[in-house]
Image: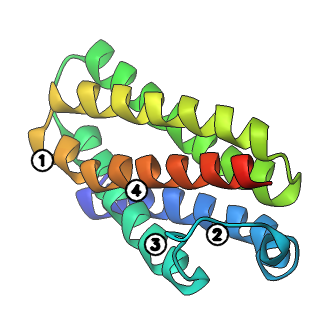
Amino acid sequence: MKPIFKLIISIAIPLAIGAVSGYFTIESVQTWYTTLNKPSFNPPNGIFAPVWTTLYIMMGIACYLIWRKDVENAQKKKALIFYSIQLILNFLWSFIFFYLHQKGAALAEIILLWIFILLTIISFSKISKAAAWLLVPYILWVSFATLLTYSIWKLN
């Protein structure tokens, strides 16, 4: 497969996951979420879409860097499994929090997501330092989102 197609696929997958999770969140963001008590550091709703879009693109580029590397198959497979698991968990958080309105379950789930992002960064770093660094803003944002989720759970 040509590298450009690998890059397009690598970026399209997280963007598609983000779009589908956005489908499950849009109504609740405008209704249920507005009724919740939120901490003073809660960002305006308009921040989330551009931040997540940027992070999804960076995640896709990181995945591409791993996919194209000529390394031991088992090492690459392990890295891509961690990456896939965190993508699934990323989707599930939005579904649990915004669609099911389960704040406590979303908190537990986002902690698991954070762990799998860290495992992905560690496994990516063994293959491509650049790929690992591309995920650092993501884990920082999810760290903030974890604090935000905890605060919303505690306040409500």
Picture coordinates of residue 117 (x, y %)? 41, 36
Among the 4 quarters of the image, the one containing residue 67: top left
Picture coordinates of residue 12 (x, y %)? 48, 64
Kindly check if marks 3 and 1 are in contact, taking CB atoms under 8 A apart as contact: no
> In front: 73, or 129?
129
Picture coordinates of residue 137 (x, y %)? 29, 56
Helix, strand or loop status at disc 1: helix
Q: Please give the name of the residue rendered at 44% of the width and 54% of the height, measured from the top-left corner.
A: 144
Q: Please give the name of the residue rendered at 67% of the width and 66% of the height, measured from the top-left corner.
A: 38
Q: CA distance from mark 4 to mark 1?
A: 18 Å
Picture coordinates of residue 133 (x, y %)? 17, 47
Marks 2 and 3, the one that precedes in the sequence: 2
Q: CA distance from mark 2 to mark 1?
A: 26 Å
- Residue 24: mark: none
Identified by mark 4, the residue type is Trp
> In front: 130, or 156?
156
- Residue 130: mark: 1
Foreground: disc 4 or disc 3? 4
| Residue at mark 3 | 53
Task: Work out whether 5 lies above or below 89.
Answer: below
> In front: 116, or 107?
107
Rate crowding at label 3 as few (under 14), some (14 to 19) or many (20 or more) other CA atoms within 10 Å. Answer: some
| Residue at mark 2 | 19
- Residue 141: mark: 4
Marks 4 and 1, the one that precedes in the sequence: 1
Kindly check if marks 4 and 1 are in contact, taking CB atoms under 8 A apart as contact: no
Marks 4 and 2, the one that precedes in the sequence: 2
Task: Work out whether 136 lies above or below 72.
Answer: below
Foreground: disc 4 or disc 1? 4
